Image (spheres, helix red, strand yellow):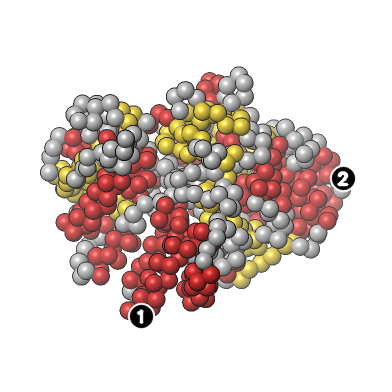
């Protein structure tokens, strides 16, 4: 596999110049960009960047949503041997300071005025940052900052250079070696500064091709690129596999039109974290609850059949003729229209990863004929470690190791991975690199789990988070906070949960309700509320959450190892956890330690036996302003259950 991303672009442009490479929705109309047009734009941008002084091995920041010109900028930097560093477009300005200074960035691409303003705000703290190019000129006409220019002007200068030096671009592309650094991704760590994960062309393309081979992906696939380009998952699905396979990547008009654009495109290959699938199902259930009695009854009857028969049909297991015919009728009347309404009428392969997905949620999509599967991987492994074969899909595992991957389970239960897709290292951080890569080439994932009898990997929790209860009836019992949190999040009314218990005698939890789902639930019961804070503290809402908590406890009681992790007390937070308030990472993972410090008064109240606690919290609004939210939070006890003893 002696190739690179720019070489693959030129191969597609030579072999199928007029085929669509990307589509972008602009002003409500889909605009296609062919492989030859994209290659021409990349050449012009690369030549322009060369004239500006971008050097081989140098880093260039790219910040914005998925756009053809953003992808072209990534390819242009790589064509010169430079290293693109995508940053999260929704990150606060201050969060960009460390990556820019750590990578010694001189040049940046910003999608629009919002991203330009962000970079200009932190420019005094980033002394090396000298040039910023923007794509969308709206609002930027009167900006006169030095080094700020449009991407159009860069392309125009590059076009003139390319005309005068016709062999330059191809010669630069040919200099690339597969083991050259292709990109760097900053992990949004739950503690401390983010780490720059360094990947080569070889590591990214090897895993992209392994995943494509596993699911038989071809150039005929249609993909919707709507997740942040700074996240390696988006980068693998819509960049590495795009260039490896040559399929079409579609860029939505905006974050607000994603669901409309999803229906219009009808992707064949789709990825979303569990929260997206949860949101889609919640919206379906809300609409069905508001539907007429006949429609609602028809839906419920066919969904009962689908839950019983659908997963078996998806897994190619034998199903009786009567059930098969009944499911076909349901497909005509309910499942097909529902798939179409969700935008999944053409999906051949759909993946979810990042967090555990609830078994009921998982089986819902599979029962209506959507081939939803789970995968396991990370930024450091170039995503693809384990995937689920089409006929071996289960909600409680993350699949089998794919081509090139070896898995080992350490004595402490930690999953170790050896793969051609492993990171080259953490940038300027040899100590952190040595902590995760062994001398034998194994990557320490920090995840605890095991391989089951069928060869599937099962993840329990993060190794560092697996603790023990201390004191009381559950003294010494295992405590897996993420496992408990995910069980709570399986309920549509609970959006987020944060569990504590390590070193304590009982487990207590802070909960975020799903404002849309609980709001709809309240409106159907004529329960008035003035906003999130007011709704969250309603006695009826507490009872709703308590029912969810006690169902989780009943489930945990069935597991001898985790029966001690049952939730004794809980509260519903007065605000939604937010990445802008540093409570979540940019990939929406809970920063449990930070939350414990920030809400120490609530943790003390939970464990101190208090019935309520006043709290005041500073929050950051979308426009950068700060304010305060305060409330007196109720704290409620939950019923726990005696562990179910296994039969002798």
Residue 196 drawn at (x, y percent): 56, 33
Marks 2 and 1: in contact by CB < 8 Å? Answer: no
Indicate the quadrant containing the C terminus: top left, top right, bottom left or bottom right: top left
Number of other residues with Cα within 10 Å of mark 2, as a class: few under 14, some 14 to 19, many 20 or more: few
Q: How many marks?
A: 2
Q: CA distance from mark 1 to mark 2?
A: 69 Å
Q: Which residue is mark 2?
A: 167
x 20%, y 30%: residue? 473
Q: Regarding mark 2 in the picture, which secondary structure is present there? A: loop
Indicate the quadrant containing the N terminus: top left, top right, bottom left or bottom right: top right
**Toward the viewer: 334 or 292?**
334
Q: Regarding mark 1 in the picture, which secondary structure is present there? A: helix
Residue 118 drawn at (x, y percent): 49, 46
x 26%, y 38%: residue? 643
Residue 591 drawn at (x, y percent): 37, 38
Image check: 5 left or right of 258? Answer: right
- Marking on residue 294: 1
Give the mark, 1 or 2, whose residue is nearer the N terminus: 2
């Amino acid at each position: 596999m002696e190739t690179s991303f720019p070489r693959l672009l030129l191969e597609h442009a030579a072999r199928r110049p007029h085929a669509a490479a990307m589509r972008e929705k602009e002003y409500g109309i889909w605009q296609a960009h062919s492989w030859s047009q994209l290659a021409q734009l990349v050449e012009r941008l690369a030549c322009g960047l060369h004239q500006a002084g971008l050097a081989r091995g140098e880093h260039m920041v790219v910040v914005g949503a998925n756009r053809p010109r953003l992808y072209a900028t990534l390819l242009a930097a790589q064509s010169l041997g430079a290293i693109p560093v995508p940053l999260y477009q929704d990150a606060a300005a201050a969060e960009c300071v460390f990556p820019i200074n750590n990578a010694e960035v001189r040049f940046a691409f910003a999608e629009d005025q919002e991203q330009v303003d962000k970079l200009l705000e932190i420019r005094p703290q980033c002394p090396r940052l000298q040039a910023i190019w923007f794509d969308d000129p709206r609002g930027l006409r009167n900006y006169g900052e030095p080094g700020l220019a449009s991407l159009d002007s860069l392309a125009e200068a590059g076009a003139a250079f390319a005309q005068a030096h016709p062999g330059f671009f191809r010669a630069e592309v040919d200099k690339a070696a597969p083991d050259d650094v292709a990109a760097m991704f900053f992990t949004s760590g739950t503690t401390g500064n983010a780490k720059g994960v360094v990947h080569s062309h070889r590591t990214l393309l090897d895993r992209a091709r392994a995943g494509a081979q596993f699911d038989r992906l071809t150039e005929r696939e249609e993909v919707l690129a709507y997740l942040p380009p700074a996240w390696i998952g988006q980068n693998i699905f819509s960049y590495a596999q795009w260039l490896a396979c040559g399929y079409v990547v579609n860029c939505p008009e905006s974050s607000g039109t994603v669901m409309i654009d999803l229906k219009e495109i009808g992707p064949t290959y789709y990825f979303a974290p569990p929260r997206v699938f949860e949101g889609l199902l919640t919206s379906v259930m809300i609409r069905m609850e508001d539907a007429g009695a006949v429609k609602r009854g028809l839906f419920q009857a066919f969904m009962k059949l689908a839950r019983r028969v659908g997963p078996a049909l998806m897994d190619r297991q034998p199903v009786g003729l009567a059930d098969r015919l009944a499911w076909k009728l349901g497909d005509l009347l309910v499942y097909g229209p529902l798939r179409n309404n969700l935008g999944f009428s053409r999906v051949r392969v759909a993946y979810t990863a990042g967090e555990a997905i609830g078994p009921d949620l998982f089986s819902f999509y599979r029962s209506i004929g959507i081939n939803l599967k789970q995968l396991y991987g990370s930024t450091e492994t170039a995503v693809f470690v384990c995937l689920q074969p089409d006929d071996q899909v289960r909600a409680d595992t993350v699949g089998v190791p794919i081509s090139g991957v070896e898995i080992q389970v350490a004595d402490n239960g930690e999953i170790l991975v050896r793969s051609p897709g492993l990171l080259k290292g953490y940038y300027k951080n040899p100590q952190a690199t040595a902590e995760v890569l062994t001398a034998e080439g194994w990557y320490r994932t920090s995840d605890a789990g095991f391989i089951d009898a069928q060869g599937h990997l099962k993840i329990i929790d993060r190794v560092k988070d697996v603790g023990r209860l201390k004191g009381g009836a559950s003294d010494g019992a295992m405590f897996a906070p993420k496992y408990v949190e995910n069980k709570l999040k399986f309920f549509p009314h609970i959006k987020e949960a944060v569990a504590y218990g390590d070193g304590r005698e009982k487990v207590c939890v802070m909960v975020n309700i799903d404002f849309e789902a609980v709001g709809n639930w309240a409106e159907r019961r004529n329960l008035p509320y003035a906003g999130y804070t007011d709704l969250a503290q309603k006695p009826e809402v507490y009872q709703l959450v308590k029912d969810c908590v006690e169902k989780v406890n009943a489930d945990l009681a069935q597991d001898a190892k985790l029966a001690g992790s049952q939730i004794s007390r809980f509260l519903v937070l007065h605000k939604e956890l937010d990445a802008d308030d540093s409570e979540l990472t940019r990939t929406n993972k809970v920063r449990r330690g930070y939350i414990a410090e920030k809400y120490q008064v609530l943790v003390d109240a939970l464990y101190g036996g208090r019935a309520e606690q006043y709290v005041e919290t500073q929050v950051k609004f979308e426009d950068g302003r700060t304010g305060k939210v305060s409330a007196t939070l109720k704290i409620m006890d939950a019923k726990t259950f005696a562990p179910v003893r296994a039969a002798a």
